Image: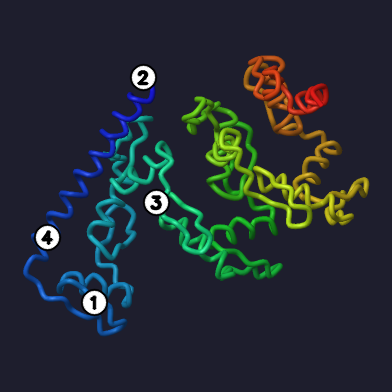
Amino acid sequence: MRSRCFSSLLQASSSIVSAEEQEGANRNKEVHAAETPLTCPTCSKSLKNQLSLTVHLRSHSGEKPFPCAACGRRFAHQLSLSLHQRVHSGERPYGCQLCGRSFLSSSNLTCHLRTHTGEKPFQCLTCGKCFSQRDNLKRHAKIHRGEKPFCCPTCEKSFYQKGQLTAHLRTHSSNRPFRCAVCERGFCDSHDLSTHMRTHTGEKPFECLTCGKRFSQRGNLTIHLRTHTGEKPFECLTCGKSFCQRGNLTAHLSTHSSARPHACDVCGKGFSEHYDLSTHMRTHTGEKPFQCLTCEKSFNNKFNLIAHMRTTHTGEKPFLCLSCGKRFQRKGNLMAHMTTHS
């Protein structure tokens, strides 16, 4: 029943997008029906008609003749201005019938629907990895080309994306402009703040379609899905051992090396990962940023909070023994139990 309901809602949402796309295609056919192709004198690109050429030339001239009356921002296309104006009006006419979220444009809704269907139509021709959005594929392609055009002027570290550099630059300063209104914790970018806010609201918008479990972050859902598929895409080139998370591989690599480059300024203890050092520092500062929303008890790391929730409030036992079916609240307890079968 759940599957049939999901399919019918998905079909309805998709039909909204398809109807608008078809309408746009029909308008284009009417406009361009009897026009002769033209060539851009700057880059030799072939355009369908004079209107397309005029719009294209703005990509060379930088001309943006359509200003927003509300904020003054200018656009090269009338359609781009129309979409932008919805930011001021609050209009979001394209609604997802599966989860209720609304979007400014049909293309945004199309991308969003893929979070429900798992569709990834954009494939990397080099490694075969697939993506749900074309822009994500373009960013990924830079990895194969070794292209890191955004360089930090302080430490010369390079990045694939401008946003990564912007976030990195704040690590060289105390600037944390995005502040949580609940606990006043500061963040380098708005995405990190949005993710953090879910620790206060309890919101978990990402659902596993196999078992129904929900997650506060898309990345956590992706990792969880591997428990169903058995996929372990991160392989150690030294010993061949594979992992379902990149972080687990990174931590494992330290077992092949004695390097501990991240040292504590207080006690001198060394760590292979900066994250481990950050967690360790809380033993000196007493900081406990992870708070239980049920009883308000605080913890110095996220995993202790999760363990507390399971043992005290939810009773959840997510770790299953495949040999006998017994379930456990902690992975360590499962691992200890597994020895009874060997």
In the image, residue 253 above or below residue 96: below
User: Circle 3 is placed at which residue position?
Assistant: 121
Mark 4 → mark 3, Cα distance in angstroms:
26 Å
Residue at image location 67% in from the left, 20% down from the top:
309
Mark 2 → mark 1, Cα distance in angstroms:
51 Å
Mark 4 → mark 1, Cα distance in angstroms:
17 Å
Residue 147 appears in which quarter of the rendering?
A: bottom right
Where's the N terminus, which quadrant? top left
User: Circle 1 is placed at which residue position?
Assistant: 46
Q: Tell me whether the residue at label 3 lies in contact with that at label 2, contact meaning CB atoms closer than 8 angstroms.
A: no
Residue 180 shows in this picture: no
Amino acid type of the residue tagged 2 in the rendering: Met
In the rendered structure, the answer to whether residue 39 lies left or right of residue 286 reads left
Mark 3 → mark 2, Cα distance in angstroms:
27 Å
In the rendered structure, the answer to whether residue 298 lies left or right of residue 91 reads right
Mark 1 residue crowding within 10 angstroms, few (<14) / some (14–19) / many (20+): few
User: Circle 2 is placed at which residue position?
Assistant: 1
Mark 3 → mark 1, Cα distance in angstroms:
27 Å
SS at mark 1? Answer: strand
Where's the C terminus, which quadrant? top right
SS at mark 3? Answer: loop
Residue 60 position within the rendered picture, expressed as x and y whole percent measured from the top left? 32, 77
Q: Earlier in the sequence, mark 3 or mark 1?
A: 1
Give the label on residue 155, or none.
Answer: none
User: Circle 4 is placed at which residue position?
Assistant: 29
